[in-house]
Image: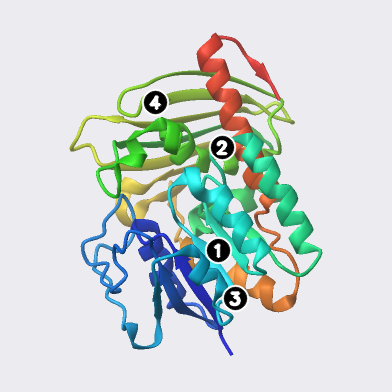
Amino acid sequence: MPLQFGFLGLGFMAATHIKALASVPDASVGALCNPSGRNLDGDFSAVGGNVGDPNGLKLDMSQIRAYRTVDELLADPSIQVVDITTPTKTHLQFALAALKAGKHVLVEKPMTRTAIEGRQLAEAAAQAAANGVFLMPAMCLRFWPEWAFVKTTITANTYGRVLSARFRRVAQAPGWGHSHFLNAADSGGALLDLHIHDVDFIRHCFGPPSRVVSRGHTRVSGGIDHLVSLFDVEGGAVVSAEGSWAMTPGFGFNMAYTVVFERATLDYDVSRGTDTLKLFVEGAPAQVIPVNGTDGYVGQLRHFIESILAGRPPSVVTAEEGFAAVAVCEAEEESIRTGLPVTL
């Protein structure tokens, strides 16, 4: 029998996960839950965001249950996995309740609103894993082929050691979903909701940074909506990242990275269409790297489902790493506030 997923929170990311689940064997949508009642009819055609499939989603609800309360969802014995895409400030509460109910949990990034909450959830996840119940933060970037490629290239030392790496993820303020995005007290602003992708990926590629120096400002949320950070990492590479929700309306969204190795430069820019990933090696013409593989949202779901069915905790990204990414973001916020480097 396929694993049945219950989706808690029915906005843009829920629609994105539901579309991805359709491409993964051994799993299906079993239930939708939203206390507001929004999209409980399975019609997500009006839901939009900064990435993903622009085509609308309409579910056949004849075999899918619809719940207005979390307790009803967690009491459904046919639901094995709860996919949490609710506002960030609710992640800890709902994830703890789902684990207590014996449900596996996929929780959208950031895993929690604060590092203190992240530590609490990581500890609860470790206890649940000892009983065969698993939690994974949805840090989808690790599963996208373009990003997995650079991680593999770094790990394999294909072109020598990394001299520098720059990551960029910038956008106009989110205009979809609810107002909680633009209330930093709830969402964490661009720092936690957007930039955290690159923080996690930097940790994935280079290990935990020992120190961070950041500069930034607010614009739309009351929190950090634009920042540039420099990370001290093992090996001495110059690693930086820029994140923003402060672009003028009409700018849209862009993500990019440039990694300079001893013998090559790898450059990715999502705005280049079919030429997104380029490799530059001295003495050779620029090479477009064909990016083939699974959609990152499909990849993360596949990994989680395979882990559950194998009875082992997820390994590509863990609850401990979800917590650590939030902790690094809080160190960046402290550096911006004080104007000083922060040691981690």
* Residue type, numbered disc 1: Gln
Mark 3 and mark 4: Cα distance apart in space: 39 Å
Q: Are marks 1 and 4 in contact (CB under 8 Å)?
A: no
Q: Is residue 270 left or right of residue 166?
A: left
Please state which of the two labelled residues, at mark 1 or mark 3, is closer to the viewer: 3
> Which quadrant of the structure image shows residue 273?
bottom left
Residue 107 visible in the shown view:
yes
Mark 1 and mark 3: Cα distance apart in space: 17 Å
**Which is nearer the N-term, disc 2 or disc 3?**
3
Of residue 154 and residue 159, the one placed in the foreground of this image is 154
Name the residue tied to disc 2.
199
- Tell me, for residue 226, which label it has, or none: 4
**Which is nearer the N-term, disc 3 or disc 4?**
3
**Residue ID at (29%, 50%):** 177
> Which quadrant of the structure image shows residue 138?
bottom right
Name the residue tied to disc 3.
80
Query: Vertically, is 256 above or below 308?
Result: above
- Tell me, for residue 300, which label it has, or none: 1
**Which is nearer the N-term, disc 2 or disc 4?**
2
* Residue type, numbered disc 4: His
Q: Secondary structure at mark 2?
A: helix
How many marks do you count on the picture? Answer: 4
Task: Please state the horizontal and vertical placement of residue 132, each as a whole percent of the image.
Answer: 76, 70
